[in-house]
Image: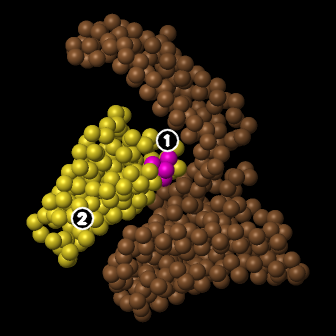
């Protein structure tokens, strides 16, 4: 995998992430699930947890805005998954497989940006695992 | 002058990595000096760069931006807001170090993927590993990245969170799920962990053992059993009760052996750690304590998971 450019996260913005969270809530609404509160709550707590973990694991510190920005931007594939959930139910083998693929996609891209921005070597899978847990929670919301 | 200063600033950051490893504590004067040099060189460099650029700045700014920035009230508001935020951040940073020893915790999270893989393998199959001694480097233990025997907090923390999620999943497949049950599981597991740590600290105090086993080390060792618990519950979800008992039994025995071999080196005296049987009531008491701690692990593993698998 090509390493991402480390200067991506020099400016952190929260517009995109908030837009994606709203889009996720909207697509869930279209699928019949009114779960805005869970989306916001889980993203806030998840960002807090990953911020604490990254500060402990990396030599350079990371700000909360940077973490929220990266996690929010990498939530986009989850919006794709929840828009699929509008048209057909995801509870089945195909649904589970696609949810797993999307969770893997989100967490690998988030961890790639984190390790290139924070200059952590040999820890991509270690950063990807907590991100996968967080995105797995979102996938649970989407599927069930 | 400035290119030379910048080159010196670029050259100096490499020196601390060479100078600090042979003598870590006494070398405190040098890094401070080097910090001052690089920041002042950078400031000089930035100041020089900004001056010619500053002349061109007012010309390039767009007019709506200029009108917004020129408004003194919004200028003041922005300045006030940023100082407030900076003050708040300072306050949090100052106080958080009082409650949570962040630098000590950073040692336990200095892990990499290879270490985690090897440690997980060791937790499941500790029978072939020969050398359980933690390597030291001038009185401080080596970071977990470099020694597979060193305790870390990444695996216990991740295993704890995964255990709560897997418990939620297990309850969900049995239609017993509700979000407050998840919170209940989390707090009960945390309560058992706290109880265990306090009980072991109390018994270590009563037996008057002089060990270098810190509380965080103890939390790390006690957190390793969650790995086996996750494996057991997942197998129980996939293959029913037989799968659960098989995997849990295997993980219980492995964690028992792992704890005995690790704690023996920390709690018992050096002579006993080499396998030589030592007489004396003191060492026997320590051996009993180690075995009690190790035996408590399988019991807790069973107690915290059996209600999840039906």
Would you place residue B145 above or below residue B299 in this image?
A: above
Based on the displayed image, in which of its 4 quarters is residue B303 positioned?
Answer: bottom right
Rounded to the nearest angstrom, the CA distance separating label 1 from label 2 is 33 Å
How far across and how far down the image is residue B54, in percent? 35, 10
Q: Does A52 lie within the magenta span?
A: yes
- The answer to whether B221 appears left or right of B227 in the picture is right
Q: Residue at x 29, y 9 (%)?
A: B58
How far across and how far down the image is residue B130, in percent? 63, 74
- The answer to whether B52 appears left or right of B34 in the picture is left
The brown-coloured chain is labelled B
Residue labelled with disc 2: A142
Q: Which mark is residue A90?
A: none
Q: Residue at x 45, y 78 (%)?
A: B231
Based on the displayed image, in which of its 4 quarters is residue A99 positioned?
Answer: bottom left
**In this rendering, does residue A50 appear at all?**
no
Based on the displayed image, in which of its 4 quarters is residue B254 positioned?
Answer: bottom right
Q: Is A71 or B154 nearer to us in this picture?
A: A71
Residue labelled with disc 1: A61
Task: Report the span colored magenta.
Answer: A50-55
Q: Residue at x 58, y 50 (%)?
A: B106
Is the stretch drawn in magenta largely helix, strand or loop? helix
- The answer to whether A115 appears left or right of A23 in the picture is right
Q: Which chain contains the residue that carries disc 1?
A: A
SS type, badge 2: helix
Q: Which chain contains the residue that carries disc 2?
A: A
Give the colour of chain A: yellow
How far across and how far down the image is residue B200, in percent? 71, 72
């Amino acid at each position: 995998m090509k390493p991402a450019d480390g200067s991506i996260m020099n400016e952190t913005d929260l517009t995109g992430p908030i837009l994606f969270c709203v889009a996720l809530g909207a697509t869930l609404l279209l699928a019949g699930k009114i779960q805005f509160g869970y989306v916001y709550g889980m993203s806030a707590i998840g960002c807090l947890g990953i911020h604490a973990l990254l500060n402990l694991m990396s030599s350079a510190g990371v700000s909360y805005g940077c973490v929220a920005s990266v996690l929010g931007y990498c939530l986009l594939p989850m919006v794709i998954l929840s828009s699929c959930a509008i048209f057909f139910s995801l509870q089945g083998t195909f649904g589970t497989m696609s949810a797993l693929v999307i969770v893997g996609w989100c967490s690998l891209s988030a961890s790639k940006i984190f390790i290139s921005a924070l200059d952590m070597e040999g820890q991509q899978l270690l950063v990807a695992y907590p991100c996968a847990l967080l995105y797995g929670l979102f996938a649970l919301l989407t599927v069930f | 002058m400035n290119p030379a200063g910048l080159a010196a600033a670029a050259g100096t950051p490499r020196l601390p990595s060479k100078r600090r490893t042979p003598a870590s504590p006494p070398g405190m004067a040098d890094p401070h000096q080097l910090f001052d040099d690089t920041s002042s060189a950078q400031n000089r460099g930035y100041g020089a760069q900004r001056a010619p650029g500053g002349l061109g700045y007012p010309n390039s700014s767009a007019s709506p931006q200029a009108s917004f920035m020129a408004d003194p009230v919004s200028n003041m508001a922005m300045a006030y807001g940023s100082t407030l935020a900076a003050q708040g951040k300072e306050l949090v940073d100052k106080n958080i170090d009082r409650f949570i020893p962040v630098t000590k915790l950073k040692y336990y999270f200095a892990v990499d993927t290879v270490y985690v893989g090897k440690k997980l393998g060791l937790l499941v199959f500790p029978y072939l590993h020969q050398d359980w001694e933690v390597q030291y480097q001038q009185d401080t233990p080596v970071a977990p990245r470099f020694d597979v025997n060193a305790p870390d907090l990444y695996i216990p923390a991740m295993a704890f969170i995964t255990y709560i999620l897997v418990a939620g999943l297990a309850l969900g497949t049995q239609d017993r799920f509700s979000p407050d049950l998840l919170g209940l599981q989390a707090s009960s597991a945390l309560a058992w962990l706290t109880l265990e740590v306090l009980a072991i600290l109390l018994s270590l105090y009563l037996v008057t053992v002089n060990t270098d086993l810190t509380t965080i080390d103890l939390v790390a060792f006690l957190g390793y059993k969650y790995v086996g618990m996750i494996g057991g519950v997942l197998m129980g979800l996939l293959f029913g009760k037989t799968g659960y008992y098989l995997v849990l039994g295997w993980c219980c025995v492995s964690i028992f052996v792992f704890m005995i071999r690790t704690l023996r080196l920390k709690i018992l005296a050096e002579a006993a750690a080499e396998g030589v049987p030592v007489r004396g009531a003191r060492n026997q008491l320590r051996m009993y304590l180690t075995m009690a701690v190790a035996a408590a692990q399988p019991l807790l593993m069973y107690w915290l998971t059996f209600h999840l698998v039906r």
